Amino acid sequence: MKIHVLLYADGGSASLEAEAGITIRELFAQSQVGFDAPCGGNGRCGKCRLYAAGALSEPEERERSFLTEGELRSGMRLACYARLLGDCELRLPEENASIETSGRSEAYDFEPTVTVGEATLTIPTLKNPLDDRGNLLSAAKAADASYAALKKLPALTRAGKWSLFYVKDGETVLDVCPEKPKAAGMAVDIGTTTVVAYFYDLETGRLLGIESGLNEQKGFGADVISRIAACIDMPEGLRALQEAIIGQLNGFVQSFCRKSGFKRGNLYQATIAGNTTMQHIAAGLSPANIASAPFIPCSLFGFTLGAEQIGLELAQAAQVYFSPCLSSYVGGDITAGMLACGLDRMKDTCLYIDIGTNGEMALRHGGEIVCCSTAAGPAFEGAHIKYGTGGVWGAISGVRADTMRADAMRNGAVQIDFETIGGVPPIGLCGSGLIDALAVMKRLGVIDETGRITDPDELEDASLAPRLTEIDGEPAFVIDPESGICITQKDVREVQLAKAAIAAGITCLIKEAGIRVSDVQSLLLAGGFGSHINGASACEIGLLPPELEPKIRAVGNAAGMGASQTLLASGSYQRLTELVACCSYVELSGYPYFQEQYIEQMMF
């Protein structure tokens, strides 16, 4: 039986049609509605919340365990549990994400491969019957011309347009025009969680606009393994995930054109940097083999595809360059980030880390770069954390304990303060707030070195006792008494697993390079999460080596900056090739020392 669903989202509405009996999450997957489902719809995280009214299945015990009675009364449901039995109305919660778009990049010369020029063709005669293609190539000093340019050429020349403008990518003419065209390009960072697109004027190098958003594949899971599983297990899964990300990029293009006055036909080039799985999906290549040993990808990229081949709505002949990857788990976002930070030209010993669902890192020492990747899991993205959330408005992004404030000294209590993204009331904890909270708990003796939340009678400061509570039969520590947001014992264990993986990866790279931690002269933290964590807190809980705290530098969205540099500096292609050549990769899954360190780094 067909049913009708009215969906309210992003200030608008849409009418959807579905078969009765499917879950809301299945409807969203079929209709390509971007929706947050960190566990991939497996009913484990309780994060796929929305408001629903109409003919729906009754909440089962498992769904009820994630929602309070007040939330259920307000109409809140979980998309992976609630089934559509008849016509319904659905409303997605408003989500204002805080996405890192700025980043550090070394200086480089502006020299794009795409150029605009003017050429005067030779007027053919009976004695000199030049063909249009050969005539154009000679006048534009080009080796080839795109099919799109050739289709336009005869009409121009027969109309007497022997002087015309061309757009050339390297040695290939992409387009011909009677008037001088605008030429723009798009540089994209496809993260597992967020996506950022930078639009540039290819004649001046000027940044024209930035578009960003949460990755529209989020409904298929929070991490790459969930996304790969969706590609394998879902009918037409790869197609659905590719359409999600390409559709999002096309939306960015439309938004940019609407704001800037450019047309999509003015976008002649794009560069993409993302982890290996994200680049596979964007290119429409199966990432299935990345998930199982020996972890062999379909491609390590470093080549171009036609925009039309992957469904990207740019100029007809536009080319899309995919940044080279090092392995299945050290992708084009890392090579692009290293390019932006100049790791290939550094003389100092430098550690570069992008902390996300995977902890990808590279250590530059003695002219060589050794890389690895650790499966940190999605805890730092807010998944599998009781009150975890992404970097959205209302997320607690910083926590501190103040024992020196006058009011705290007066009543003998420790004052715990926090700040939220956007300065609005708290809705949960994002990764940076989670790390701060754990550091505060360790400092105050709320957790011991094993990560156990202590009993009230073990606390050195009795004023903290009221913050200790119990949730679902396990100890918890309240961060905000008003909202009830707290850290549970399970949350602590999730962070221990994540931070141990990152810390163990660092020690393995140090060992492979044959140096000591103290030999590292700089530690670059890349990505949205890495750029916003408190270095002192990260060192306090053992996520990063304490010796490196004064050497930490946040470099922001280095992957986006590297994609931009590739778009704007033609020499970047060769530099990326040479950078990859001087890198070696350590597969930690078969590395005994990693297993030893992983266990050791569990401790706080």
Image: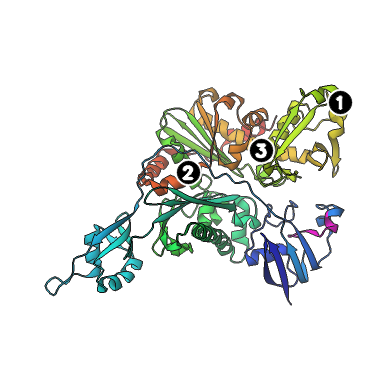
Point out the residue furthest to the left here: 127
Q: Residue at x 36, y 51 (%)?
A: 203
State which tag comes first along the sequence, 2 or 1.
1
Q: Is residue 33 left or right of residue 578?
A: right
Q: Residues within 10 Å of mark 1 (few under 14, many from 20)?
A: few
Which of the 4 image quarters holds residue 74?
bottom right
Which of the 4 image quarters holds residue 369?
top left
Q: CA distance from mark 1 to mark 3?
A: 27 Å
Where does label 2 land, which residue? Answer: 561
Q: Is residue 198 left or right of residue 467?
A: left
Q: Magenta residues?
A: 71-80
State which tag comes first along the sequence, 3 or 2.
3
Where does label 1 land, which residue? Answer: 462
**Residue 73 covered by magenta stretch:** yes
Q: Which mark is residue 432?
A: 3
Determine whether 526 is above or below 305 in the image: above
Q: Residues within 10 Å of mark 3 (few under 14, many from 20)?
A: many
Could you say whether the residue bearing mark 2 is in a helix, strand or loop?
A: helix
**Residue 527 covered by magenta stretch:** no
Determine whether 348 is above or below 294 in the image: above
Q: Is residue 25 left or right of residue 477?
A: left
How far from the left and from the top, in percent, is residue 348? 44, 27
At label 2, the amino acid type is Met
Q: CA distance from mark 2 to mark 1?
A: 49 Å
